[in-house]
Amino acid sequence: MAENLLKHLDKMDGNQPELVRLRRYCEMLEAGSRAVIAFGVWSIIKTCMYFLMPQLSVREWIADLADILDRRSGRIILIFMLSALFAVDMSMRIYVGRSAKREVRGKGAGWFYVIVAGFLAIEALEGMTDGIIAKTAHYMTFEDRLMSSLVDFTAFIAAMDVVIPGLLIKKMRLRLRQKGE
């Protein structure tokens, strides 16, 4: 099934409950794949806020790094480390998004993207709870932490919109193949 799975499902008898659910899961997976990629931008913004806000522990860490190396080398290393972190994070998100889209198209994307999406969901959940519960974010007001947590909650929902439909689509496809449809 190299063509888009949603188009293929439209050609079939749409009254079958399994096919209706499969179509709905494909639509959820496609929307979730876009959202996971989009929330990569939020991840970058949040990390920049963390490093640029006047948080004592980060400033001490940068000062220690600057003492060990000269100031210019310390900044270069910090910029390199942040760039590597951003690249890894966005690569994971793009991988999940593209793999989920391959799944919707019926090209089979394997299971690994679901595992990575689960990791992204855990990461978003951790960020959400850290924003509300943690005392380390003393540089942010309660409203700032609440807004950050709400965005992280939305990122968690987006990641789960890839994990759950991804698993259900794989399960339903297996069942449909066994029926011979």
Image (cartoon, rainbow, N blue to C red):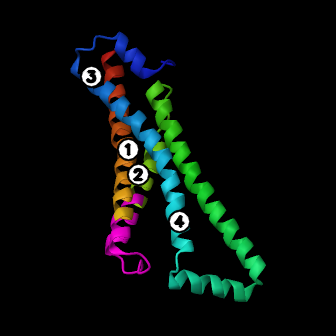
Q: Earlier in the sequence, mark 1 or mark 4?
A: 4
Residue annotated with mark 4: 47
Residue 54: give x, y in percent of width and height. Answer: 52, 80
Identity of the amino acid at label 3? Answer: Val
Tag 3 and tag 4, C-beta contact below 8 Å: no
Q: Earlier in the sequence, mark 3 or mark 2?
A: 3
Alpha-carbon span between mark 3 and mark 2: 25 Å
Q: Earlier in the sequence, mark 1 or mark 2?
A: 2
Residue that appears at 71% across and 75% down: 75
Q: Rounded to the nearest whole Å, what is the CA distance between mark 3 and mark 1?
A: 19 Å
Marker disc for residue 118: 2
Residue found 35% across the figure and 35% down from its top: 28
x, y percentage for residue 4? 47, 21
Residue 6, position as x, y percentages in the image: 40, 21
> What mark, if any, has residue 41 been given in the picture?
none
Residue contact at pointers 1 and 2, CB within 8 angstroms? yes
Crowding at dot 4, Cα within 10 Å, few <14 / some 14-19 / many 20+, comes out as: some
Which residues lie in the magenta part? 124-146
Q: Earlier in the sequence, mark 3 or mark 4?
A: 3
